[in-house]
Amino acid sequence: MNLRIIGALVAKDLSLFFRNRFFALITVLGLVVYMVIYFIMPKAVNENLEIGLYAPVVLPAFEQMQEEGLEIEVIESEELLKEGVTEGQYVAGVVLPADIMEDFMSGQKPKISVYFAPDVPEEIRDAVGVLIRELAYQQTGQALTIEITEEILGPDLAGMQIPPRDRMRPLFAVLLIMMETFGMANLISEEVERRTINALLVTPVSVKDLFFAKGITGVSLAFVQAALFMAIIGGMSRQPLIILTALLLGAVLVTGAGFIVAALSKGFMSVLAWGMIILIILFIPAFGIMFPGAVTGWVKAIPSYYLVDTVHRASNFGAGWGDVWYNLVVLLGADLALAWIGIMALRRKLR
Amino acid sequence: MSLKHVGILLGKELWQGPKNFIFVWALVMPIIISLVVSLIFGTLFNEKPKLGVVDEGGSQLVAMAEQLPSVITKEYGSVAEIKQAVESGAVDVGMVLPADFDSSVMQGEETELVTYIWGESLAKNRTILGVTIANLVRELTGQEAPVEIEAITLGDEVSIPWNDRVLPLVVLMAVLLGGLTLPSASVIDEKEKKTLEALVITPASIGDVFIAKGLMGVILSLFMGVVILVLNQAFGTEPALLISVLALGAIMAAEIGLLCGALIKDITTLFAVWKAGGILLFGPAIIYMFPQIPQWIGKLFPTYYFLQPIIAISQGGSGWSDIATNVFILVGLDLILVGVVVFALRRTRQFAV
């Protein structure tokens, strides 16, 4: 392997990339658009059920109920309550009748009116109904004969939930990296189709040099974009070194995948066909981060799982080396395996 | 422009099209995406709290919980299974009902109920599930609710379920994949293989070639738009109006595709344009998905004027008077794009005829 030649090939590929101002501009623009989407997404999670209460009489069970996830605010008049519900200040407005205590004492069932904004989903309406019934049970002193013991599994994020945009951070970064699968595959496929690769190979450039140079170009382009994105959106405020390592290993992974796609393809159309299949497969684990519980254990068979899981845990939970070392080792193994398979397949194709 | 030449070229495109990967991709992908989206957003994006239950003794509580509209109930076979489900976020709360649970609570005995809570579960979901469990136990023991609840809705708007929120994105994908990608990839492919040069030395002009490719994109795009709306049962009450708007959107997609075809030299660059520009085109659909984002931002994107009438007709039951302004803007954008494509063709030396 000749480092000088590799350096020259990388410089050639990168200068070709940046000489095409349009290509360069559009890549930057792509990054900017992803960032804009990130920044306009909600930055906080509202995990409380805000309920307005108009109670002409004092009902301790209702007024003192301030559980985690529930905010009951006492309002001075029914009109103000309706206004608050209409403006979206409260998910529901509860109006207790003035004679509710008399009804309770005489064994009658008082009627409680609950106002909802029109966009409140059916399940929330039902849930508020269940909640009011439970408060009424408590107010009338009906005992519950069960003792509930609770065990929290995983880090308890009550009150400090991860906003959707932060949950999507690994997805954006991984998407940026994975798109380079196409770029890398197309770059090699074009060289093969145009036979410039054969021309290169009659110079002192060896097949190893060529693959190494292409690999470095692919890894650099994928890694720099993803790292830049994560840095700007604040994704590296926790465990930056781990995230950078994961992104670098991810960039190697997609470069290896790009080699395989290039070996399988004959022109851009087949690059698209094969690339799309690989992209969809690699994308599935990111989907599992966005929608927890949506995918089962088999997702661990996909190497990109170890990339998204590491980025997610490090950037959102501050996971350290001790927590993610296994992911990084598996990712490295997958990198080596994919790169080896890709290079072998391409070698066969060039023979 | 010669209609005969355009017809012959269009015939060639239609004959050769099905052998082209992009053509098949534009036909198949929207259908796959639509099916996957309805599966995913019909279930995964459901905001209902999820309750997992392990029933060790045939408790009636499970059947009662399954009938509740406010929670999703899933049953598991063992404590290990439910713990795994809670840890992965498949359910917000998991509870283990002991073998003699029903008889114990009915006899008024103090009974222990073990629950597992997913750490990432929203606080409101925990509260809802907590009171739901308490309510179910009370119902099981025969306690009668001491109040009657009257639900009153203020205003007449309706909440939009996730399935409907995602529909514009799927429609846009269907229209753009065919309408934009097919003409652009086809022109670029011909440029790369130098067959375009061969074509323009025949009696067919470059304009004829572009019109034929654009028409092909419009036909495929319109067809896929209709298919997706039919698949999602979102045809509304004004099918003729809906198809007209879809056709205008398909024309816009094809014009953008032709513009890309005229300006872009190779497929790699087209791909880069898709990477960045695709998000600009899908912007209004993404904004529609998240009501928290100010909806006026959508109006900054050209595809908004195609998408808004489609949503209004298919989901809001709107008629011509409600969408007329946006349709006129869409027609205006289509006409401007025609001018831009012609200008781009004239400016591009490669196509000078």
Image: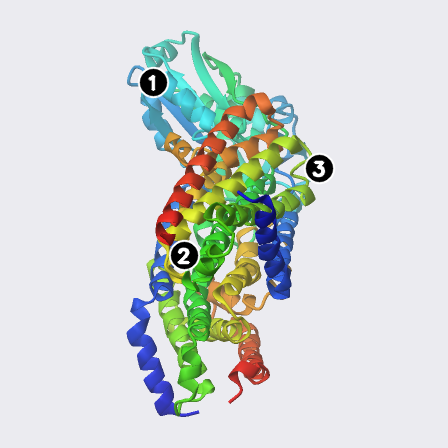
Q: Which label number is shown at residue A76?
A: 3
What residue is shown with label 2?
A271
Give the x, y percent position of residue A240: 66, 33
Q: CA distance from mark 1 to mark 2?
A: 46 Å
SS assignment at label 1: loop
What residue is shown with label 1?
B78
Number of numbered callouts drawn: 3
Give the x, y percent position of residue A330: 46, 29
Residue at the far right: name it.
A76
Amino acid marked by disc 3: Glu
Disc 2 sits on a residue from what chain?
A
Give the x, y percent position of residue A285: 45, 38
Contact between labelled residues 1 and 3, with CB atoms less than 8 Å apart? no
Contact between labelled residues 3 and 2, with CB atoms less than 8 Å apart? no
Q: Is residue A54 above or below residue A259?
A: above
Amino acid marked by disc 1: Ser
Q: Earlier in the sequence, mark 2 or mark 3?
A: 3
Can the viewer see residue A97?
no
SS assignment at label 2: helix
Residue plotted at (59% across, 51% down): A10
Q: Is residue B263 above or below residue A147?
A: below
Residue plotted at (60% across, 28% down): A317
Q: Is residue B317 above or below residue A115?
A: below
Tag nearer the camera, 2 or 3: 2
Amino acid marked by disc 2: Val
Q: CA distance from mark 3 to mark 1?
A: 50 Å
Label 1 crowd bin: few (<14), some (14–19), many (20+), radius 10 Å:
few
Give the x, y percent position of residue B45: 46, 43
Can the viewer see residue A190?
yes
User: Is residue B41 left or right of B62 when viewed as pictured?
Assistant: right
